[in-house]
Image (cartoon, coloured by chain):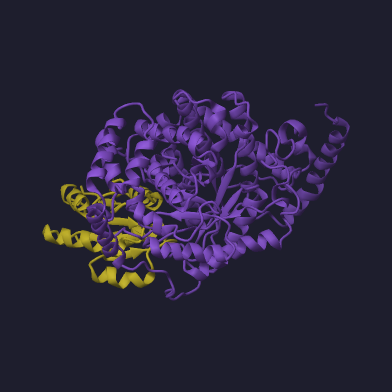
Chain colours: A yellow, B purple
Amino acid sequence: MVRPIRVLVAKPGLDGHDRGAKIIARALRDSGMEVIYTGLRQTPEQIVAAAVQEDVDVVAMSILSGAHNHLFPKVVNLLKAEGVDDVLIIGGGVIPKEDIPFLMESGVEAVFTPGTPTKDVVDYIYNNLKR
Amino acid sequence: MEKNFDGYEEIDKSYNNWENNKVEKIKLRFPERKEKFTTSSDIEVKGLYTPLDAKDLNYVEDLGFPGEYPFTRGVQPTMYRGRLWTMRQYAGFATAEESNQRYKYLLEQGQTGLSVAFDLPTQIGYDSDHGLAEGEVGKVGVAIDSLRDMEILFDGIPLDKVSTSMTINAPAGILLAMYIAVAEKQGVSSDRLRGTIQNDILKEYIARGTYIFPPEASMRLITNIFEYCSKEVPQWNTISISGYHIREAGATAVQEVAFTLADGIAYVEAAIKAGLNVDDFAPRLSFFFNAHNDLFEEIAKFRAARRLWAKIMKNRFKAKNEKSMQLKFHTQTAGSTLTAQQPDNNIIRVTIQTLAAVLGGTQSLHTNSRDEALALPTEDSVRIALRTQQIVGYESGVTETVDPLAGSYYIESLTDKIEEEAYELIKKIDELGGAPKAIEKGYIQKEIQSSAYKYQMEIESMEKIVVGVNKFRIEEDAKSDILRVDADVEKIQKEKLKALKLNRNNEDVKTALNILEKKAQTDENLMPYILNAVKKYATLGEICNILRKVFGEYEQTVIL
């Protein structure tokens, strides 16, 4: 039997806006993936520990507080430091378009902004898995 | 009340006639756009409303007169004929210096009250040099670490002249204490201060996320504030019971009313349990609602909330003072309806939402800026948002008479329906043991999440149209004029903190914190001890850490 895709949906930082994260979590689950949701206020270290422990294929982070340029790259780097290089890292939230090139250079592979249909995220994950 | 059945029978007859002949016929040639029309709360909307839909309405009992029980038509007798609502833009970012500039700008532009946005570390009780504050300092609001920052924030703003609303919850008592201390330095005594602290922890557990302490300790801090203010800061609104964030998290209009009033009931019960007399604190309770796009449902929502709260206070809590029964509220337009696509379209959405709030009888209003789905608003965008209120207030004419939509068959029928359905939900929460228990069990969160998911699916299936998002789209470039918070803010705040700790009397701080720690373990009101620590320039983080030590921290139940 094929193992279902495992996704960690994470809320890094102090931001409490979790409507989007929860909708994404549910949409991914409805599409057949296994979803672990961290809950609020996770440090990058906690997120990376959860990703490793749960052996996930995807880390999907959501930030609406403006701290994305700081926190997203931190998670990417910590994952690398753990020797994890086959996890797909994506992000979303209130993120100005101008910031997206920087985030992608930092190793976030896709950034989804407000108005994105959940189906686009599902399709993206299916098409871009690294393992 | 005696009902005039003669008229209704005739209307009923001609209504059926009209429906069977005219409507059915035209529908054969031109079918309606949808099989079923509904509001956001899934209340079915008929094609036409007639006196038949309002025939059970008892004018005096159900509507009454503005300024009189049950306050359906408004809390003041003359409403906007006397004075327009308070135009209050929520603002704050970066350092106290920069936010102080923005406040002065807004006051110059004709804004009539201040509304302070704090950054997340401040809201969660961390100083700017805390590890968890990294990347968040000054981002969604102003960073306040101590009384020193607060002095700068209100520099040159006379606190006896403006009213100030502060969006602060878990550490509300500390920020209020800082405000009182700044006023004292300006020579303004606390009994002359007007404003509001949000101070609504239950909705933080439900929807907003800036909790610190567990429910019991949090409720104690809240009732401490009620009691302290009833004596020392009598003009202060001690809580703003908020449906806003519950709606933003995805609740329907009915759920917004129900969950907010259920939280309100929990606060009243806690205060009564703490020994307070209902009429001593209830007049200072205020509410905070969302204004969404569904214009008529929103107007009906505000009217229903007023009537329902009045009944709850009178019948359930036996309030005697009419002021205890008045649901006064602030409104903010719905951030979740703003689109990142074609952001200028948001100006129109905000206009509709402004109308909803005003026609619903709000006491104050924040209008969102067009660019808030992208970042914090620029000064230009904030001005347009404020101008939107001013145009509705001064040009539209909707302010000239009180509750102008009363008597509309549709509005009255919707008002009844929302009240009825919200009341059912409140009963359900009562059965679960009240709002705190319903939150603990995840009931409220689950209800909101399923509404949010349903809404999202309706957009994706094109059942609901959002202009610019799932229809009428265009290719767009990245918007370049967005507000950015300087990354140096964190560094500046850290340096200010360092300097503060070098220059204050650290022995005094230690003593004040020790007393607070001891008192926190008793049943005494903590406000005087918090005020004392604040005046000694103890930092927000230091004070919260003492309370964390005594009370512990809240652990979120993750509901999915």
Please provide percent x and percent y for residue B362: 62, 48
Left or right position of A73 against B70: left
Left or right position of A105 against B46: left
> Quick check: B176 above or below B223?
below
Please provide percent x and percent y for residue B395: 71, 63
x 60%, y 53%: residue: B86
Left or right position of B526 against A3: right
Closer-to-camera residue (B307/A102): B307
Please provide percent x and percent y for residue B355: 65, 55
Closer-to-camera residue (B167/B22): B167
x 51%, y 34%: residue: B230
Please provide percent x and percent y for residue B298: 61, 48
Q: Is residue B505 visible?
A: yes
**Quadrant in which residue A126 is drawn:** bottom left
Closer-to-camera residue (A62/A128): A62
Q: Quadrant of the C terminus of chain B?
A: top left
Please identify the residue farthest to the front as the structure is shown: B187
Q: Quadrant of the N terminus of chain B?
A: top right
